[in-house]
Amino acid sequence: MVFIGREREIGWMRLYLEHEANKILAVTGKANCGKTALMQEVMKRLGATHTFFYLDLRLLDVSAPEDFVKVLLYLLRLARREQNFIRRLFNGSRFEFSVMGFKVSRDVKFEDVLQELYLALIEELKKVKNPVIVVDELQSLRELYYNGGKKLIDSVLEFFISLTKHQHLAHVIVLTSDSTFYAELYSKSGMEKRMRFYLLDELQREEAMELIRYWSREYDVELDPEGVYNYTGGNPALIEDIVAKVALYGEFEDVVKDELRMASAKIKRLIKKGFSFKRIEEMEYEEGQEWVEENVLFYNVQKECFEPQHRIIELAWGEVLKVRK
Ligand SMILES: Nc1ncnc2c1ncn2[C@@H]1O[C@H](COP(=O)(O)OP(=O)(O)O)[C@@H](O)[C@H]1O
Ligand SMILES: [Mg+2]
């Protein structure tokens, strides 16, 4: 797996992980800007000194509160590196509904199950060297409720706050591309004392150019990195995508024209649906939300403004604006 640059960000993460656990680290950034890749790289480099527990909630398919119990069981199993322990945990207890082959009873309160798992996890984490829990795609928990209205995310955050701020037992890193969800966390009262917020930018210009050169070599196409960068910016996924398409279809100009046409078509279609459309910087929070849901815009909580998800969208947005004037 190719990984380019990000030395500054890795250094910053290293600092966070080398200090005593005290706050949850909440990382956001545009979709495909490289959050997961950065995290994987940090785990690789610090694997000798820290014990990472990486949970990708999208991969683990968390779509109901019970699924999160599965995640906690999985985490426990990782921490314990054995199955029998979990059997013992539930053996003879009142739990009966079945998750991953373990029976948990339906009439047991969901929060009791959570509580029992949290406590068991705390005991296990105490035995592990520098534990770090990484939860990718945290927004998967956003709309999950238990006991008719309690938010699962609140319970999970309380648990993470206990692991960091209260017990200094484990570091916790949560990642999400969902800027609306992130904005909610950001504005939760008291959160600034419990969470460190970190917005990961796209690749710097030089890093992007290096990646363009890398993919050009891999796909065996000749491209002017400067020219490609004008259409991709520092979005690593977009860079690979465009270089790959050039390898497949031939001309760079045709490929970007096509990308721009598709992005413009999407924007126009959404305008027809009634989405408000103006200069991105002038978009009000409520107006921008629907564009965020459609993955066209990203809400930057720190600057309190919307930004295009990537360079092609920025260019397409500009073109549609020009035509409509
Ligand atoms: N620093 C990097 N160097 C090379 N490729 C990268 C880098 N960061 C991300 N990528 C690639 O870009 C794509 C999107 O990155 P990913 O980490 O999945 O984004 P995110 O998690 O922010 O949505 C992946 O294919 C990933 O391998
Ligand atoms: Mg990711």
Image (cartoon, rainbow, N blue to C red):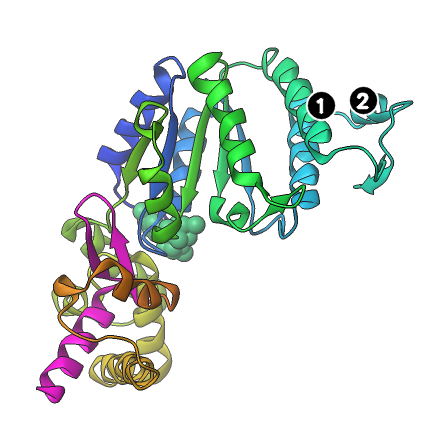
Q: Are marks 1 and 2 in contact (CB under 8 Å)?
A: yes
Of marks 1 and 2, which one's residue comes earlier in the chain? Answer: 2
Give percent across and percent down for residue 193.
Answer: 32, 23
- Say whether residue 231 is left or right of residue 175: left
- Magenta range is 296-325
What is the secondary structure assignment of the residue under circle 1?
A: helix
Does residue 168 show up?
no
Return the residue at label 1: 116
Q: What residue appears at the point 37 percent right and 36 percent down from the top-left corner?
A: 26
Vertical order, 323 against 278 (above or below): below
**Residue with the most extreme right position:** 92
What is the secondary structure assignment of the residue under circle 2?
A: helix
Is residue 299 shown in magenta? yes
Give percent across and percent down for residue 254.
Answer: 24, 86
Give percent across and percent down for residue 21.
Answer: 41, 17
Corner quadrant of residue 315: bottom left
Which numbered tag is attached to residue 93?
none
Front one among 164 and 222: 164
Front one among 119 and 315: 119
Vertical order, 167 against 189 (above or below): above
**Type of the residue with mark 1:** Glu
Q: What residue appears at the point 36 percent right and 44 percent down from the top-left corner?
A: 184
Corner quadrant of residue 159: top right
Q: What residue appears at the point 61 percent right and 11 percent down from the top-left corner?
A: 127
Return the residue at label 2: 89
**Residue with the most extreme front position:** 148
- Say whether residue 99 is left or right of residue 154: right
**Type of the residue with mark 2:** Leu
Numbered disc in front, either 1 or 2: 1
Front one among 10 and 294: 294
